[in-house]
Amino acid sequence: MKKISIIIVGIIVILAFPILLNYLILQPAHFPVVGEPVNWLMFWPTYIGAFASIGMILFTYKTLKHNKEQLNEIKRQWEEEHKPEIVAYLVGHNNYFYLCVKNISKSSAKNIKIYITHEPIETGIGFRNEFVDKINKMNFSLEPLGRRYINLNIVYLQHNKEYRDYIGLKFTYDTNNEYSVDLPFSDGSIIEDSLDEHKIHSAVEKIPTELNKIANNIHKK
């Protein structure tokens, strides 16, 4: 009902405007003016049209600005969702500490390199030089939401043992992304992650591929 009322009022204004304009032009002038009434009749549409054009320009400008802001926000969200991001933590498994590197993004993390920024120096936890060299030479990739486990060759002793030392790591990946973290061994002695379960899932995912291979071999025979 409100929409119909607005339409009716708009039609009335459109029809009444020429009549009102003609009436005003035919009224005696109270001060000298240039031109005849017909000149003023031609002037007003041009004058009003100019204001309408300015209004359209401002409206178009605001619309384009709003669209640009929306596009920038969409672009920002897309980049945020597709920007690779990794995290790392220590876990204990089968009497050893493992470093878990996980890709928590929806995009692949490529050219991942690890640098040790702090070597544990507590008695019984120290790294061997050859292991440090291997870590520093590693270069691998992670699929979206993928993870890799790296055996640190440090014996995971009792659950109640307090490891006061830590390992400091810096990761570089893709072109210019960095991630640094200090991982206390006391946290790794508490956090458990089922590597066996992960291996089972990986094996189950390979079953369809192996079945297809068997079926293809039978078909060839």
Image (tube, grey):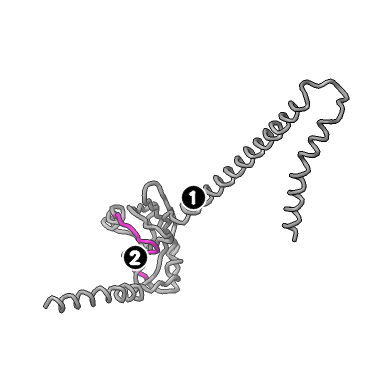
Name the residue beneath numbered marker 2: 149
Q: Position of residue 107 (x, y in %)?
A: 39, 58
- The quadrant of the picture occupied by the N terminus is bottom right
Residue at horizontal 43%, vertical 70%? 189
Q: Is residue 94 visible?
A: no
Which mark identifies residue 75? 1
Q: Is residue 24 above or below residue 204?
A: above
User: Which residue reaches farthest left?
Assistant: 221
As helix, strand or loop, the secondary structure at mark 2 comes to strand
Residue at horizontal 76%, vertical 45%? 13
Residue neighbourhood size for the residue with mark 1, other residues' Cα within 10 Å, grouped as few (<14), some (14–19), many (≥20): few
Q: Position of residue 116 (x, y in %)?
A: 36, 53
Q: Quadrant of residue 51?
A: top right
Residue at horizontal 36%, vertical 63%? 125
Q: Position of residue 135 (x, y in %)?
A: 31, 56
Left or right: 20 with respect to 201? right
Range shown magenta: 138-156
**Mark-to-mark CA distance, 1 and 2:** 34 Å
Left or right: 181 with respect to 43? left
Q: Is residue 161 magenta?
A: no
Residue at horizontal 83%, vertical 31%? 26
- Under mark 1, the amino acid is Lys
Front: mark 1 or 2: 1
Name the one closer to the observer, 17 or 74: 17
- Under mark 2, the amino acid is Tyr
Choose the circle earlier in sequence order: 1 or 2.
1
Please identify the dominant SS of the magenta region.
strand
Q: Quadrant of residue 112?
A: bottom left
